[in-house]
Image (tube, helix red, strand yellow):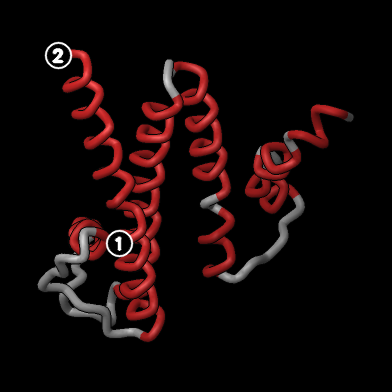
Amino acid sequence: MKYLRTHFLFFIISIPYLNIIDYYHIILSEELRYFVRFIPLVRGGYALAIIVGRFTNSKVTSLFISYLTMLLATVYFSSLLFFSIEQGLNPGVKEYTDSLWWAFMNVTTVGSNIYAVTVAGKILSVVLAALGMMMFPIFTVYITSVVQKVNSKST
């Protein structure tokens, strides 16, 4: 019970929801089923965070690797969501790689030649750019701390 109390989130995401849904023939809308399929990806991300924490020697390196993992996961999930929302409605989104390009360009706040046409896509664009503005200073802080550490060892 102690393990369950301390790792409740991991327990919740470890339940094979898709298998249960298929076994009991539960009918979900296509949109809801699409989001339920993300649960194994969340489980993988959580496991990756545990592994990163175990194999890194310093808290700064652990933070940086966790940051990169979170940034890539954000771009990946955003591109999947953008693709599912905009495909067929947006003439700029023909393949998944178009959505991936859009997500990378928006998270860096550079922008791209693909723009959202749906309301949900426009909201996702703003959220992704805001997350990028919050995440990139962490990269700058990490690089600065590494440079300072190297400079302090050389003097």
Instruction: Report x, y in % for residue 45.
Output: 49, 38
In percent of width and height, residue 3 lies at 80, 28
Please say whether residue 142 is visible from this viewpoint: yes
Q: Nearer the viewer, residue 13 or 57?
A: 57
**In this rendering, the label closer to the viewer, 1 or 2:** 2
Tell me where residue 149 sits by quadrant.
top left
- In the image, which disc is placed on residue 101? none
SS class, disc 2: helix
Label 1: how many Cα within 10 Å (few below 14, some 14–19, many 20+):
some
**Is residue 26 rendered to the left or right of residue 92?**
right
The residue wearing badge 2 is 154
Q: Residue at x 52, y 51 (%)?
A: 38
Q: Position of residue 60 (x, y in %)?
A: 39, 29
Asked whether, in this view, residue 24 is left or right of residue 82, the answer is right
Decide which of tag 1 and tag 2 comes sooner along the chain: 1
In the rendered image, which residue does mark 1 sit on?
A: 133
Residue at left 34%, top 65%?
128
What residue is rendered at 58% in x and 66% in y?
Answer: 32
**Mark 2 is on which residue type?**
Ser
Height in image: 83 above or below 135?
Answer: below
